[in-house]
Amino acid sequence: MDVLTLTFLLFIVLLIFLKFDYRKGDVYYIIIAAILGPIGEIICVYFGVWSYANPTFLGIPIWLPLAWGLAVLAIKRIAVIISEIRK
């Protein structure tokens, strides 16, 4: 899949996710994940732990920050569901 197409699709999925299930603080989680996740990936790529087939910026694909943001939101939602079940 084209890098720009995947970036666009992840952005649309993120917008849809936020439109239908926005919770206070979500934007902060996305921003933090979109910064810290790729920094870790850049470090790993730099030291040769892994590599990406089609990197576009500092050894990582441009869509990676969006993927980290979505992943953190999904993990946050799962944690909330589990904590509600345990009550």
Image: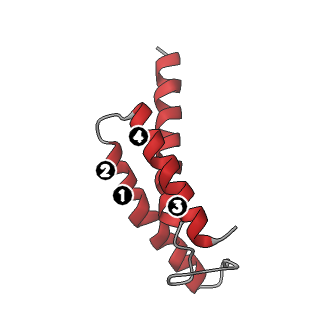
Which of 15 and 50 lies nearest the eye of the viewer? 15
The answer to which image quadrant residue 26 occupies is top left
Give the CA separation, mark 1 to mark 4: 16 Å
- Dot 3: within a 10 Å radius of its alpha carbon, few (fewer than 14), some, or many (20 or more) residues? some
- Residue placed under numbered mark 1 in the picture: 32
- Residue placed under numbered mark 3 in the picture: 8
- Residue placed under numbered mark 4 in the picture: 18
Residue 31 position, x and y percent, is 35, 57
Which of 5 and 77 lies nearest the eye of the viewer? 5
Please tell me whether residue 6 is drawn above or below residue 19 in the rendered image.
below
- Dot 2: within a 10 Å radius of its alpha carbon, few (fewer than 14), some, or many (20 or more) residues? few
User: In the drawing, what numbered circle is on residue 2?
Assistant: none
Earlier sequence position, callout 1 versus callout 4: 4
Q: Amino acid at mark 2?
A: Tyr
Q: Amino acid at mark 3?
A: Phe
Numbered disc 1: secondary structure: helix
- Residue pictured at 65% horizontal, 71% vertical: 2
Q: Quadrant of the N terminus?
A: bottom right
Cβ atoms at labels 3 and 1 below 8 Å apart: no
Residue 62 position, x and y percent, is 52, 72
Residue mark closest to the camera, 1 vs 4: 4
Numbered disc 2: secondary structure: helix
